[in-house]
Image (tube, helix red, strand yellow):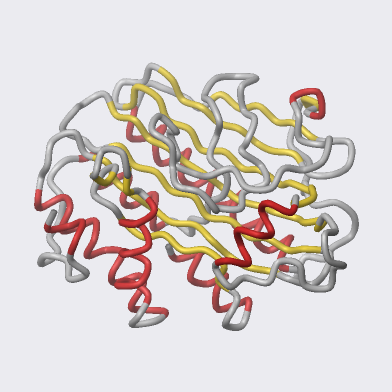
């Protein structure tokens, strides 16, 4: 409860144990994240693609991400075309390297490479198996899964680039939060969107090492709206207060670097987001969570996602 209900972390200290050191390091490696893998395993890499985070996480959902709008007829299983190797970019058309779509995808791919390399080095036995797929109308993904490792029972780190349309339900939910995702569109019209993100879940063998999850993403609509979202959370089986103090202290430092109000705001958002109502408890010991971030220059939000 000390970590769920307070916005002031305990005094930060270094972790004892190679697993948590490596995972926390991986979270600090230019990491950005996006959609949660719906399932782990080769050829089971479908992402919960139209990722408007509008509903509470369901028990058993590994990444705790809510399904928002779905793309009309273009993100079903039959729309995924496996390819042998990832192209230079999954962004459709000529966006230019300085467009936020390309910048965010490039950041996610760099983070995916760095994190997977760090986890393989730590594990010493397991290796990530990669699946790459594309969609005929644009977008695709790079799914990486490590199974039956020496340190990790299973670990996933997956990238997704999606083109789709938001249905009225997703628009209504975002409007209730004050977000104008229907900008530039006619009333009742489905909103075409672009989304890119990276998501990761790490399950260690040792029950004293907590499960980690992060998910960061970027959206644009054809009407001109854009926003950033994401977060990181931790779920220990056995509480080690020193570990939790370090985790929350690290994220407070990251948040304070960009905005002194971020940590208290985003920590509470995570506590609320991961609250399981029918159980009257949170899932895990929180972290940070945010969505609909578009009130500053896009590069400022990009920089925060990169550091977080």
Q: Is residue 32 above or below residue 68?
A: below
Along the line of sight, the residue nearer the viewer: 187 or 19: 187
Quarter of image, res 81:
top right
Q: Is residue 222 left or right of residue 273?
A: right
Q: Position of residue 292 (x, y in %)?
A: 57, 67
Residue positioned 27% across, 46% down in the render: 282
- In the rendered image, residue 247, in percent from the top left (x then y), is placed at 24, 56
Residue 177 % position (x, y): 54, 68
Work out whether 295 lies above or below 193.
below
Q: Would you say 5 lies left or right of 294 here?
A: left
Q: Residue at x 53, y 40 (%)?
A: 36
Q: Is residue 285 left or right of residue 74?
A: left
Instruction: Please tell me which residue is depicted at 77% across the width and 65% down the height of the picture.
Output: 97
Residue 88: percent from left, percent from top: 77, 47
Q: Quadrant of residue 87?
A: top right
Q: Above or below — where is 232 with respect to 8?
A: above
In-image side of 115 versus 241 (left or right): right
């Amino acid at each position: 409860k000390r970590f769920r209900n307070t916005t002031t972390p305990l005094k930060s200290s270094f972790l004892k144990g190679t697993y948590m050191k490596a995972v926390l390091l991986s979270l600090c490696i230019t990491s950005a994240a996006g959609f949660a893998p719906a399932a782990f395993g080769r050829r089971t890499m479908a992402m919960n693609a139209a990722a408007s985070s509008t509903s509470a996480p369901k028990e058993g959902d590994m990444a705790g991400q809510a399904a928002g709008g779905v793309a009309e007829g273009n993100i079903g299983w039959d729309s995924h075309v496996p390819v042998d190797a990832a192209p230079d970019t999954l962004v459709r058309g000529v966006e230019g390297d300085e467009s936020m779509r390309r910048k965010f995808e490039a950041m996610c791919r760099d983070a995916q490479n760095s994190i997977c390399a760090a986890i393989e080095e730590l594990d010493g036995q397991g290796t990530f198996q990669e699946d790459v797929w594309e969609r005929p109308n644009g977008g695709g993904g790079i799914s990486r899964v490590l199974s039956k490792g020496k340190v990790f029972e299973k670990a996933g780190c997956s990238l997704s680039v999606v083109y789709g349309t938001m249905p009225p339900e997703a628009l209504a939910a975002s409007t209730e939060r004050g977000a104008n995702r229907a900008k530039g569109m006619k009333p009742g019209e489905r909103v075409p969107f672009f989304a890119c993100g990276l998501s990761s879940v790490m399950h260690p063998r040792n029950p004293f090492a907590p499960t980690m999850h992060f998910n960061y993403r970027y959206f644009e609509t054809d009407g001109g709206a854009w926003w950033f979202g994401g977060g990181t959370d931790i779920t220990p089986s056995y509480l080690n207060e020193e570990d939790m103090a370090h985790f929350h202290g690290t994220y407070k430092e990251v948040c304070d670097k960009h905005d002194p109000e971020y940590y208290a705001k985003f920590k509470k958002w995570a506590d609320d987001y991961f609250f399981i109502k029918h159980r009257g408890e949170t899932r895990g010991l929180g972290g940070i969570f945010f969505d609909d971030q578009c009130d500053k220059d896009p590069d400022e939000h990009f920089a925060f996602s990169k550091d977080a």
